[in-house]
Image (cartoon, rainbow, N blue to C red):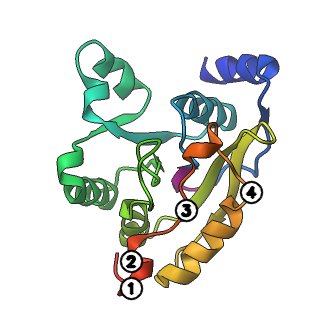
Amino acid sequence: MRRLIARIFWTFSRWKLVTEPAPTRPTLLIGAPHTSNWDFVLMLAIAWKLGVDFRWLGKKSLFAGWRGPIMRALGGIPVDRADASRVVDEIVARIRAGEVFSLVVTPDGTRGGNTRWKSGFYRIARDTDMPVTLGYVDRTTMTTGLGPTLSLTGDIPADMDRIRAFYADKAGFHPERRVEPRLSAEDGPASV
């Protein structure tokens, strides 16, 4: 059913899916630039078209009331932003316990107001040895999809340089809300 919905979406959408093949093993999939709630719709359409089994992190208020069961059925994992480090530890524990899934994260945060990417994606990828797939939305070309899949080395500046190079020409749904891919750890000691 999901593939049928995705096929209909891509047939009628003004957005064009330009993507590398889906990863063959679980991956941490970055969704960036995250500048609009429409990014969520595009993410679902990409994943359903490519047959990617994924989970995604969302603020816990999205899971309140009647929306909770729907968001969970769509792969959502509620996040309490008051204790972000606990979220990373819980995801790492789930993966180490044998749960198999790809995880979509939006490290540039809440569609505005941030000047740096959040480092949780980097810590999850390193602690679980998951590769990182670069997903994107680019309104200037009306394209979206998956880019390359990278293995993080632990050299934060070098890894982020590769990520920045990919996203350099990607503007997001609302280009004015785009956040440059940079971690706070790049400004000081190399720890995430």
Place residue 25 in its image quadrant: bottom right
Question: Which quadrant is the N terminus positioned in?
Answer: top right
Q: Which residue is mark 1?
A: 190
Depth check: give the residue in front, 67 or 189.
Answer: 189
Residue 52 shows up from this direction: yes
Q: Which residue is mark 4?
A: 169
Q: Residue at x 38, y 65 (%)?
A: 119
If you read the primary sequence from the N terminus, does the residue marked by circle 3 or circle 1 appear first? 3
Q: Secondary structure at mark 1?
A: loop
Q: Residue at x 43, y 41 (%)?
A: 55
* Three-letter code for the amino acid on which mark 1 is drawn: Ala
Q: CA separation, marks 4 and 2?
A: 23 Å
Question: Answer yes or no: do the residues labelled 3 and 1 have beta carbons within 8 Å?
Answer: no
Depth check: give the residue in front, 129 or 162.
Answer: 162
Q: Secondary structure at mark 3?
A: strand
Q: CA separation, marks 3 and 1?
A: 19 Å
Q: Which residue is mark 3?
A: 132
Residue stretch in magenta? 24-31
Q: CA separation, marks 1 and 2?
A: 5 Å
Place residue 88 in its image quadrant: bottom left
Question: Answer yes or no: do the residues labelled 1 and 2 have beta carbons within 8 Å?
Answer: yes
Depth check: give the residue in front, 127 or 16.
Answer: 16
* Label 3 vs label 1, nearer the camera: 1
Q: Secondary structure at mark 4?
A: loop
